[in-house]
Image (cartoon, rainbow, N blue to C red):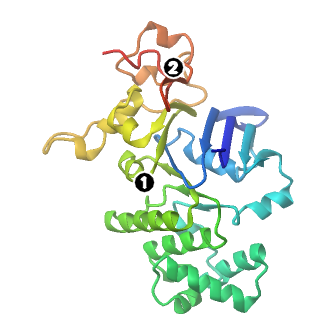
Amino acid sequence: MSALLEIEDLAVDFVQEGRVSTRAVRGVSLELSAGEALGVVGETGCGKTVTGLSILRMLPASARASGRIVFDGRDVLELPERELRDLRGSRISMVFQSPGTSFNPVFPLGRQLQHVAERHLGLGRKESARLVAERLREVELPDPERTMRLYPHELSGGMLQRAMIAMAILCRPSLLIADEPTTALDVTLAEQILRLLRSLQREHGFAVFFISHDLDLVGDFCDRVAVLYAGRIVESGHASELLAHPHHPYTRALLDALPRRAHPGSALAAVPGSVPTALEEPPGCAFGPRCPRAAAECTVAPPPLVPVAPGRDVACYRWDAS
């Protein structure tokens, strides 16, 4: 099966005063098939969101992206601006982690969603209103007609996230990018939102690029997982296999830090240190200074991402050390 999305050797730098200040993404390559859910995980600062925003070319002006992002046979990084605007919100859409800051506060919610339908589907005002009400009903928002008249500040966080999902699926996209969609919600609401996303994906068959720092969520939702560290993929594979038998020390550390793994009354496990910045990165493996298995060979050059089993890649010189 040909991939719906192919990211090849993506690199994203941020430039200030003519110099590179941050290397956010460094040679990331990923594939995503139609209807598949890919989880992209890692700590804050590992390049997850920047990778997701690159797919829609929504990076700030200071960003410099290279490589290829091929969606449905076209390189997004080479598209003219007009074609890119046609793609956003129609074939590719995004659910942001902070819906409260993603809607315009001065327009009613329904009018904002209607604008998407009118822009991409060519619908008139009455037809777009009917479609928006249908989508709000689909994401289980009560009384859609009344909800459409409300302003964003009049909705709860959970309702706003459902409205953002309704906007994202309005035009039946082929790819949905979900950037930590449950971060601002409590546990109960988070589970409801994930259950809703799963149901919508099964019904409509869109692919999901699921960004998260929570391996439990990714394990429940995704078919495959890619673990990012300091802008590079350090491990990837089928979700069930990777989470049950992690090979990279960083993946193991993330799993060990899950609260459910702690014994009652004991301190939660933590990964010592922090993700290196562009100016701090060591010459060898970026995870080396935090890694309990680091050896002399790890300080020479960054380990390449290599296959260690069918469908399983790891970037570690000592992934099989006992």
Location of residue 163 in the rendering, given as x and y in whole percent from the top left corner: 54, 75
Relative vertical location of residue 293 with respect to residue 6 in this rendering, above or below? above
State the residue at coordinates (21%, 41%). 262
Rendering quarter of residue 241: top left
Q: Callout 1, which amino acid?
A: Phe
Mark 1: secondary structure: helix
Mark 2: secondary structure: loop
Q: Is residue 77 left or right of residue 14?
A: right
| Closer-to-camera residue (10/127) | 127
Q: Residues within 10 Å of mark 2 (few under 14, many from 20)?
A: many
Task: Identify residue for label 1.
Answer: 221
Please identify the quadrant where the C terminus is shown.
top left
Q: Residues within 10 Å of mark 1 (few under 14, many from 20)?
A: some
Location of residue 155 in the rendering, given as x and y in whole percent from the top left corner: 48, 80
Q: Callout 2, which amino acid?
A: Cys
Relative vertical location of residue 235 with respect to residue 77 in this rendering, above or below? above
Location of residue 287 in the rendering, given as x and y in whole percent from the top left corner: 46, 24
Please identify the quadrant where the N terminus is shown.
top right
Location of residue 30 in the rendering, given as x and y in whole percent from the top left corner: 61, 39
Relative vertical location of residue 277 with respect to residue 130 in this rendering, above or below? above
Say if mark 2 contacts mark 1, CB within 8 Å.
no
Q: Residue 285: give its label.
A: 2
